[in-house]
Image (cartoon, rainbow, N blue to C red):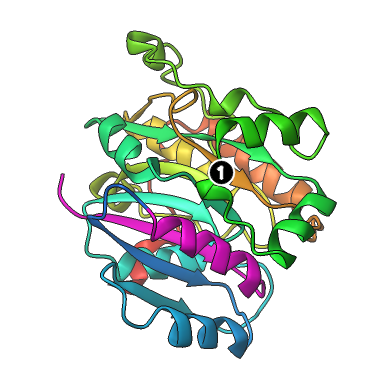
Amino acid sequence: MSLISVIVTTYNWPEALNASLQSLLSQEDQNFEILVADDGSTDATAELIRNRYANNSIPIKHIHHEDQGFRAGTIRNKAVSCSQGNYLIFIDGDCVVFPDFIKTHRRLATKGYFVPGNRMLLTKNFTQKVLNEKISLHNQSATYFISRWITGNINRITPLIRLPMGPLRLIHPLRWQKAMTCNLAMWKDDFIEVNGFDELFQGWGYEDSDLVIRLIHKGIKRKEGRFAVSVLHLWHRQNDQSQHDKNFQRLMERLHEQEFIRAEKGLDQYF
């Protein structure tokens, strides 16, 4: 594996995106590119990227489309179509990563597997403090996070634990649950084979689970990223979940259609 493509999904929250990009630019492994998958933000996001991130050693591309409601799968497909790497890591633009994030994902990458990491959730008040005071979370020590957990500012501390696990990472090869695009890696060839995200999933809900289920149907197995690679997820309001039931029903149908692998409306329309 050479170049890694990091897809960062964002929508109208440049302050959080700035924190996410700052953590990515502080990586120990610098052999990657960043593609900001912008699901219809106003000019403030474009101005942030243009004014603060125009001349970095790590290339940052801004892929944007009009705001027509929640279309995260669509903008991620568009971003992947512009990517140069052969390995993809998806994160959200309100996630802060640690300095070994890229290095660890590279180490975990194995042909025939996708790798979901896990996350720690920040509270609303702590998120506001981090953004208002521009606290560089990615530079903080384990002691700092333990103290924030004790005071109830972070929901859990276990994702910080690093364990080798070895073959235990492979014990749930068909498990699709809790594999989310706030921290999910896979080979680009596998993503192309399943035709990326299915854009028939409109509105919030389950487009990432559908992707993982189709990968499993194709024969791509799960390799656990817990106790190795985690992200800090800033607090935000829940998205509009009016499409939840419809999307969940489609997901359950897909789960049992093991021959269904390629998205009906997916990545291929952008090549």
Residue 109 appears at what percent x and percent y? 27, 34
Image position of 112 (left or right of 223): left
Viewer-side residue, 64 vs 4: 4
Relative to 266, residue 154 above or below: above
Q: Residue at x 31, y 74 (%)?
A: 56
Identify the amino acid type marked 1: Gln
Q: Is residue 181 visible?
A: no
Residue 268 falls in image quadrant: bottom left
Residue 64 appears at what percent x and percent y? 49, 80
Please state the extent of the stretch shown in magenta in the rendering. 1-26
Q: Residue at x 45, y 51 (%)?
A: 90
Residue 163 appears at what percent x and percent y? 43, 16
Relative to 254, residue 256 above or below: above
Q: Is residue 201 magenta?
A: no
Image position of 160 (left or right of 162): right
Relative to 228, residue 244 above or below: below
The residue at which mark 1 appears reads as 140
Residue 225 falls in image quadrant: top left
- Estimate how packed mark 1 is, as few (under 14), some (14 to 19) or many (20 or more) residues with alpha carbons within 10 Å: few
Q: Is residue 5 magenta?
A: yes
Say which quadrant the N terminus sits in.
top left
Q: Residue at x 40, y 16 (%)?
A: 169
Residue 271 appears at what percent x and percent y? 27, 72
